[in-house]
Image: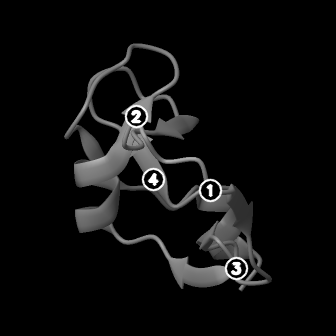
Amino acid sequence: MTMFRCKKCAATEFKLMLQPAFEGKVDIAHNENQEVVIRVEGKEFLADLMFMNQFAICKECDAINQWEYYFPSDAASSV
């Protein structure tokens, strides 16, 4: 499950826009609450909508600044 969906094509997969000179390690994962966790050089934070719209690109349509929160219905039923 993911917390974000592209408003343009409804895809949920994304890639991050990084500075071209950045050579550090970046990992993207989900925590036990299914929130998107970003790890940069060992520092960890939860992605929010502002972060997604500033730094995430849709893997399907390459849209930027098109993210919205997304909570699939089966995730709500498991709470």
Q: Residues within 10 Å of mark 1 (few under 14, many from 20)?
A: few
Between 21 and 44, the one lying in front of the other is 21
- For the residues labelled 4 and 2, the Cα–Cα distance comes to 25 Å
Instruction: Relative to 39, say whether 67 is above or below.
Output: above
> Regarding mark 3 in the picture, which secondary structure is present there?
loop
* Cβ atoms under marks 4 and 3 closer than 8 Å: no
Q: Which residue is mark 2?
A: 20
Quarter location, residue 34:
bottom right
Between 39 and 33, the one lying in front of the other is 39
- For the residues labelled 2 and 3, the Cα–Cα distance comes to 20 Å
Quarter location, residue 42:
bottom right
Can you give x and y, in whole percent of width and height, for residue 37 in the image?
Answer: 62, 72
Which is in the foreground here, disc 2 or disc 3? 2
Can you give x and y, in whole percent of width and height, for residue 4 in the image?
Answer: 45, 53
Drawn side of residue 18 relative to residue 23, left or right:
left
Q: Which residue is mark 3?
A: 42
Amino acid bearing label 3? Gly
- For the residues labelled 3 and 1, the Cα–Cα distance comes to 10 Å
Lower sequence index among marks 2 and 3: 2
> Regarding mark 2 in the picture, which secondary structure is present there?
loop
Drawn side of residue 74 relative to residue 52, left or right:
right
> Regarding mark 4 in the picture, which secondary structure is present there?
strand
